[in-house]
Image: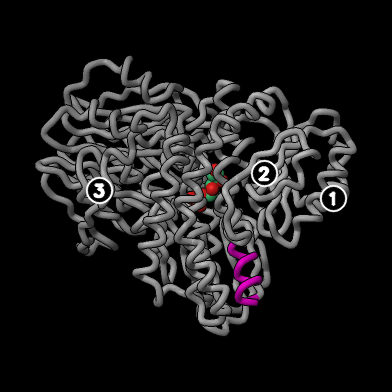
């Protein structure tokens, strides 16, 4: 989950490396560092964010270098634990993303051979192994070193004796950007999109030698070719475009994202649907994508009658019994370790997997049998927003394309789905009201989100967004479940956000709200614009534009995202980069 970058070219490496690195901070931001080859390798790193390195790092004129932004796994954020790491001689500098699971035994044997370690990280074994194996070829030394590693890695190696960078990957993404007499290497495309849109995605097991005008990739010692791909989005997609935060920009992009996802998948339609008469479906995902999975489960069961279970990636990996049928893996990044492990488990059991992801060439798309690409474009803010609604749209399309759906419902939903971008646009008219209510919410340390049926996962998502960026303790509950324990936490004035759709659960929601009001909680209800039933019952009513009740999760999500945003802003939180989190969780 760290971010790594490399540069080899005709310009000074340092400013380019740090500029690229600043666009990777969503992968981790507890410390950062850079190494550039001048006369010898110069390293500057600290327990600070990239901006501080940009200010404080002394002049380095070399045209070859690597840089890193860290999300600590082994050892706390500190200067010594920051990357790049060096070997004993200072001839090799390495930046690493991933986790080396056998680092303790490697460290022990290297120490016995005389290597001196200065950090607590797993990564530091890599430069020492390279030092150990180096004879006259840096590529050979890297190959020998990675043969010793268990776990996951993407690495970029800078060597004092070579005018090239050596890269390698296993279970951790790495992309090479091709420029004009220069090459860029990064964990992810947003880092380098300002410099080039021509990229090569490395695959697991690849080792690459990158010079300023050539990329040579080998696997098991044999040279291999990788296709050059053209990225269709541009540098403006990774800039704030006048918004104060990426999160707000990304929330406002949602009408466009929904339209693009609808168009993209309509074109691909038939080859992407769930097989007819499949016995059951397992949906695997984590975090926000898991919440999207729960909506998928609801509509698949409701509209197709296919028994479906949604599992959290990390839990699924410990299950002994797999359900027969097919699986859907939902992952914005396509790199979430817990999801990838689950996919591999399904794959080895011969279960067909459909991936729903936002990232072309991601590991999830490579493991899956088929992939639906959502068209969210790069999502920079750690809090997932536009990717969530795009995942929902993809799931609706998947269901609507299935031959077993009732044609009348399908036709109705298909029409309503096309209107959803306009409906979501209208939600933005509610922003002043949402800001108003966020003042109340921002003064509390605890909040509840409740929903029923298809809007229960939206309660989970609303709570996840709020806790993630405002640090307010928030619980998402099925409304009927509060009385089974959480009622004990209700006190006078505690904020309860109720999501009330015009569906079969409406009256039960009203009953739950009455029970909550009887305990003096402060209720804000999110209701359909045509629903007046709660006007006199709750403290605040937010009327959202009307939509088909089965599509109401898409519409209801947006005010909750805005609510989390404005509440976090009032509390002075670092919205795009919340503490302890990273965008792409590539460790188990
Ligand atoms: O890339 P993925 O969709 O697999 O990521 C899964 C979660 O890590 C992610 O959704 C996380 O929960 C978000 N930061 C929530 O906003």
Q: Is residue 440 above or below residue 230?
A: above
- Percent coordinates x, y for residue 303 in the rendering: 61, 73
Question: Residue 24: which quarter of the image?
Answer: top left
Q: Nearer the viewer, residue 231 or 143?
A: 231
Q: Is residue 155 above or below residue 229?
A: above
- Percent coordinates x, y for residue 537 in the rendering: 81, 39
- Percent coordinates x, y for residue 448 in the rendering: 74, 39
Q: CA distance from mark 1 to mark 3?
A: 57 Å
Q: Which mark is residue 511?
A: 1
Read off the magenta span: 294-306
The residue lying at 14 percent from left, 40 percent from top is 182
Mark 2 surroundings within 10 Å by alpha-carbon count, few (fewer than 14), some (14 through 19), many (20 or more): many
The residue lying at 35 percent from left, 34 percent from top is 23
State which tag comes first along the sequence, 3 or 2: 3
The residue lying at 60 percent from left, 54 percent from top is 553
Q: Which mark is residue 455?
A: none
Q: Which mark is residue 176?
A: 3
The residue tagged with tag 2: helix, strand or loop?
strand
State which tag comes first along the sequence, 2 or 1: 1
What residue does disc 2 label?
526
């Amino acid at each position: 989950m760290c971010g790594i970058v490399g540069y080899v070219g005709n310009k000074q490496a340092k400013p380019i490396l740090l500029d690229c690195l600043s666009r990777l901070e969503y992968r981790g931001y507890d410390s950062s560092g850079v190494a550039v080859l001048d006369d010898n390798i110069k390293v500057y790193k600290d327990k600070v964010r990239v901006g501080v390195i940009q200010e404080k790092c002394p002049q380095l004129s070399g045209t070859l270098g690597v840089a890193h932004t860290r999300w600590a796994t082994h050892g706390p954020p500190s200067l010594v634990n920051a990357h790049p790491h060096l070997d004993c001689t200072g001839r090799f500098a390495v930046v690493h993303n991933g986790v080396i699971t056998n680092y303790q035994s490697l460290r022990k044997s290297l120490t016995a051979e005389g290597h001196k370690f200065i950090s607590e990280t797993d990564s530091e074994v890599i430069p020492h192994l390279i030092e150990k194996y180096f004879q006259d070829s840096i590529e050979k030394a890297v190959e020998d070193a990675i043969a010793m590693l268990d776990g996951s890695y993407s690495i970029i190696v800078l060597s004092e004796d070579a005018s090239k960078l050596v890269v390698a990957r296993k279970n951790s993404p790495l992309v090479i950007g091709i420029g004009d007499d220069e090459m860029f290497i990064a964990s992810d495309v947003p880092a380098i999109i300002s410099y080039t849109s021509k990229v090569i995605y490395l695959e697991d097991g690849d080792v690459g030698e990158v010079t300023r005008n050539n990329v040579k990739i080998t696997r098991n010692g044999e040279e291999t070719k990788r296709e050059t791909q053209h990225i269709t989005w541009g540098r403006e997609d990774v800039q704030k475009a006048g918004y104060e935060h990426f999160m707000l920009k990304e929330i406002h992009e949602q009408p466009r994202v929904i339209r693009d996802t609808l168009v993209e998948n309509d074109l691909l339609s038939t080859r992407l649907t769930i097989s007819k008469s499949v016995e059951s479906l397992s949906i695997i995902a984590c975090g926000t994508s898991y919440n999207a999975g729960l909506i998928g489960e609801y509509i698949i069961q409701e509209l197709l009658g296919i028994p479906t279970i949604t599992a959290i990636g990390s839990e699924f990996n410990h299950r002994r019994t797999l359900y027969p049928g097919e699986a859907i893996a939902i992952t914005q990044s396509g790199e979430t370790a817990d999801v990838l492990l689950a996919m591999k488990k399904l794959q080895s059991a011969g279960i067909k997997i459909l991936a729903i992801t936002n990232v072309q060439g991601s590991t999830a798309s490579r493991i899956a049998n088929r992939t639906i690409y959502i068209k969210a474009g790069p999502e920079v803010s750690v809090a997932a927003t536009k990717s969530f609604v795009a995942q929902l749209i993809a799931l609706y399309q998947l269901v609507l394309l299935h031959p077993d759906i009732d044609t009348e419902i399908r036709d109705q939903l298909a029409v309503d789905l096309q209107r959803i971008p306009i409906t979501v646009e209208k939600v933005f008219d509610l922003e002043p009201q949402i800001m108003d209510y966020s003042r109340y919410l921002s003064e509390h340390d605890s909040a509840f989100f409740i929903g029923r049926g298809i809007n229960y996962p939206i309660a989970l998502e609303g709570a996840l967004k709020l806790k993630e960026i405002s640090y307010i303790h928030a619980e998402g509950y099925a409304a009927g479940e509060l009385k089974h324990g959480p009622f004990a936490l209700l006190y006078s004035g505690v904020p309860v956000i109720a999501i009330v759709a015009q569906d079969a659960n409406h009256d039960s929601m009203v009953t739950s709200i009455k029970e909550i009001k009887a305990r003096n909680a402060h209720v804000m209800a999110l209701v359909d614009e045509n629903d007046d039933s709660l006007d006199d019952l709750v403290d605040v009513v937010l009327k959202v534009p009307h939509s088909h009740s089965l599509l109401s999760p898409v519409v209801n999500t947006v005010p909750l995202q805005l609510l989390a945003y404005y509440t976090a802003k009032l509390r002075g939180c670092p919205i795009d980069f919340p503490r302890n989190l990273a965008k792409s969780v590539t460790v188990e």
